[in-house]
Image: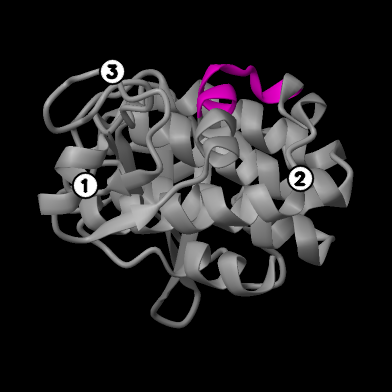
Amino acid sequence: MPTYPLRALVLRKTKLGEADTIVTLLAEDGRQVRAVAKGVRRTRSKIGSRVEPYAVVDLLLAAGRNLEVVQEVQTISTHEAIRSDYDRTAAASVVVDFLDKVSVEGQVEPKTFPLALATLDVMETAEPDDLRALVLAFLVKALAMQGYRPTLDSCARCACEATDATMFSAAAGGVLCSECARIAEGVMPLTCDARLAMGALLGARMADVAALRIPRPVADEVLRVLGVFAGYHIPARLKALEYFARHG
């Protein structure tokens, strides 16, 4: 079988048979790759510990009929501090679960891989109180990269100026002016502080998100709105986000 190198982020592992594992990967160019790592659940396997979720790895893959086959793995970053801490794991799970749901085999999206790595790198050393804002920043940026950038300064329905808008529509894709909010369905309240926070998160580098110092009530409101927004546009249940919203 022909082989080729691939740098990737490990998103998920699934057991296959008695000793094999299917590894779901986000490739450096943003496409999803699924590969079988043979025999990795045996105690003497040298590969098993290198393909854990959140790890960034260089792989040598053999092209297969349905799944690629892992031949070699070299670890670039383990993100071990994430796996060893409950709060960091809960936050990082939102990242990999979202990417698992939106990445597609053969479909390139080069911005998602750098965003994922920047997010996980910051989460690994962030203060626990900053993890919520990091999740929010990742979500709003990742949604924008998928074509769902929220409209925050003008009405998403009629395009009039709406800097004082207090309602948000997931279907319309952003805030609504008072006139449109009266006739639209499924709108949610959105305070000025939450709207400004969403804009700040969208524009901030991941390394600078903690410096925004978003108050917990505002972060909770943004999380609620982004959860509905993501759920409306992403055709899959985001279980990690649901869990984080309840327990994060």
Q: Mark 2 points at which residue?
A: 215
Q: What element carries label 1?
A: helix
Give the CA separation, mark 1 to mark 2: 27 Å
Q: Which of 105 and 115 is in front in this view?
A: 115
Q: Is residue 147 left or right of residue 54?
A: left
Pointer 3 or 2: first along the chain: 3
Is residue 3 visible in the rendered image? The answer is yes
Q: Is residue 160 left or right of residue 121?
A: left
Q: Nearer the viewer, residue 107 or 230?
A: 230
Residue 200, position as x, y percentages in the image? 59, 23
Q: Name the residue under label 1.
A: 181
Q: Which residue lies furthest to the bottom in this view?
A: 18
Q: In which quarter of the image is the C terminus?
A: bottom right
Q: Quadrant of the N terminus?
A: top left
Q: Mark 3 points at which residue?
A: 161
Residue type indicated by callout 1 = Ala
Residue 50, position as x, y percentages in the image? 66, 48
Residues drawn in magenta:
199-207
For disc 2, the neighbor class at 10 Å (few under 14, some 14 to 19, many from 20) is few
Main SS, magenta residues? helix
Mark number displayed over residue 149? none
For disc 1, the neighbor class at 10 Å (few under 14, some 14 to 19, many from 20) is many
For disc 3, the neighbor class at 10 Å (few under 14, some 14 to 19, many from 20) is some
Residue 69, above or below 63: below
